[in-house]
Amino acid sequence: MNIEFSEDDLAFQNKVVNFIKANLPKGMEMWTKRNEWFQALKAQGGWDVPKWPVEFGGPGFTPTQRYIFDMEMARHATPPQIPFGVGMLAPILMNHGSKEQIDRFMPGIRDGSVNWCQGYSEPGAGSDLANLKTKAELSEDGTYYLVNGQKIWTTLAHIAHWMFCLTRTSSSGAKQEGITFLLIPMDDPGIETRPIITLGGSHSVNEVYLTDVKVPVTNRIGEEGKGWTYAKGLLVHERTGLAGIQHSVLALEKSKANARSVKTGDGSLMDLPSFKNKVGALEAELLALEFTELRTLSQVSAGEGPGPESSILKLKGTEIQQRISELNIEAAGIYAAPWGGKPIGPDFARSATSSYLGGRATTIYGGASEVQKDVIAKNVLDLG
Ligand SMILES: Cc1cc2nc3c(=O)[nH]c(=O)nc-3n(C[C@H](O)[C@H](O)[C@H](O)COP(=O)(O)OP(=O)(O)OC[C@H]3O[C@@H](n4cnc5c(N)ncnc54)[C@H](O)[C@@H]3O)c2cc1C
């Protein structure tokens, strides 16, 4: 395994950092000048879609360049992209969509003018996703599907124009076999979206009810009954991305600064051995995880994986994110208690509790921790 960056890679890293310094909007402009930022990335030759292949307008990064690019973007806290279109649906369209579907949907995905949501989970079909029951029945003339059922935990469904959706077209054979991948417009009169307010007090997830929704067969990706295969291919990549290692490095630095601002006796909270030990342990685990990620990258560069190791990254990466949010709660002390009302105490205390509570979800979505442990036991440790 070679995890040293080459001269060329280091030159690329310099280029990325210089680009960020010259173009990244500052302060509140991060939100108002978001589009300009993505346009500037695009003008670099596809840096707005770093994971897309060259034939679809991507930059053709090597796996190492992609790692460096992601790392620098995270280190400099650049505006995040909503993942559903660019990161999730686009690769499925590229691999399994028809030319007509690619021409129709890719432009809106790339320029961000069309919002997508992911309609996979249902009550009773989360970890066991293949258990999904939302039914799609082909019309007698074979021109459309009539879709009935319920999706749940659908992130950003309330602002989405379209949903990519797993539906059941057959109940015979293995559960994974009768699943069909459909693209459904969210303004159909048969769709009702109801908000779910999560523990952190925010509205990002929803229930989506589908009643007699007519979906033209031209909105089906690939073959009927093959949706599971199309959706599954992306899961390992999704898990790798959820580890958020560089974001955690940045977040931990912020937590240390927060703790330094909290005075205790002659020093600060950061000087207390009990607190320092927790920070040190997290730094060591983050470094170990970074090496695991580099090891995975080394395999990908050699044309393998990412394989089941992506479950290690997801499991540990999300646990670390949660532990960092716990440090902030500890540093905020009593000021973490009255969250949501009139802010009191240091600035960082305002979001400490909502981030902590909202962050509980990271070990659930993208595959719950227990399920990742199962994958690691069976496929990495060979225990089953
Ligand atoms: C904030 C948030 C956003 C989400 N966004 C989306 C989205 O946009 N689109 C979408 O389709 N879904 C989304 N999800 C759903 C998410 O993928 C599911 O919540 C997740 O897969 C777990 O499924 P479940 O909630 O049904 O829990 P269950 O599968 O019912 O699990 C309940 C508990 O049992 C454990 N468990 C389950 N099976 C096993 C097993 N075999 N071995 C050991 N333990 C097990 C789980 O780990 C968990 O602790 C989101 C979830 C959250 C919380």
Image: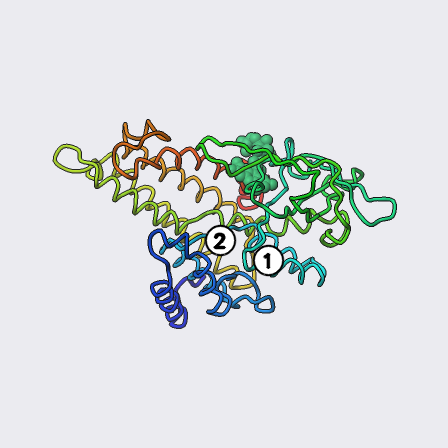
CA gap between label 2 and label 1 equals 14 Å
Question: Which quadrant of the picture is home to ligand 1?
Answer: top right
Q: Amino acid at mark 1?
A: Gly
Q: Secondary structure at mark 1?
A: helix
Please give left or right for residue 33 compared with residue 264 in the image. Answer: right
Q: Quadrant of residue 75?
A: bottom left
Quarter of the rendering occupied by the C terminus: top right
Give x and y (percent) for residue 324.
Answer: 35, 40
Estimate how packed mark 2 is, as few (under 14), some (14 to 19) or many (20 or more) residues with alpha carbons within 10 Å: some
Q: Is residue 341 visible?
A: yes
Please give left or right for residue 349 compared with residue 247 in the image. Answer: left
Give x and y (percent) for residue 371.
Answer: 56, 37
Q: Is residue 383 visible?
A: no
Q: Earlier in the sequence, mark 2 or mark 1?
A: 2
Foreground residue among 203 and 330 = 203
> Contact (CB < 8 A) between labels 2 and 1?
no
Foreground residue among 174 and 122 = 122
Seen at 66% across and 44% down, the residue is 187
Q: Nearer the viewer, mark 2 or mark 1?
A: 1
Please give left or right for residue 142 compared with residue 297 in the image. Answer: right
| Scheme of colours in the image | rainbow
106 above or below 7? above
Seen at 44% across and 48% down, the residue is 244
Q: Quadrant of residue 18?
A: bottom left
Quarter of the rendering occupied by the N terminus: bottom left
Tell me the residue that label 2 is attached to. Answer: 81
Q: Amino acid at mark 2?
A: Gln
Q: Secondary structure at mark 2?
A: loop
Callout 1: CB less than 8 Å from ligand 1: no
Tell me the residue that label 1 is attached to. Answer: 108
Q: Which mark is residue 321?
A: none
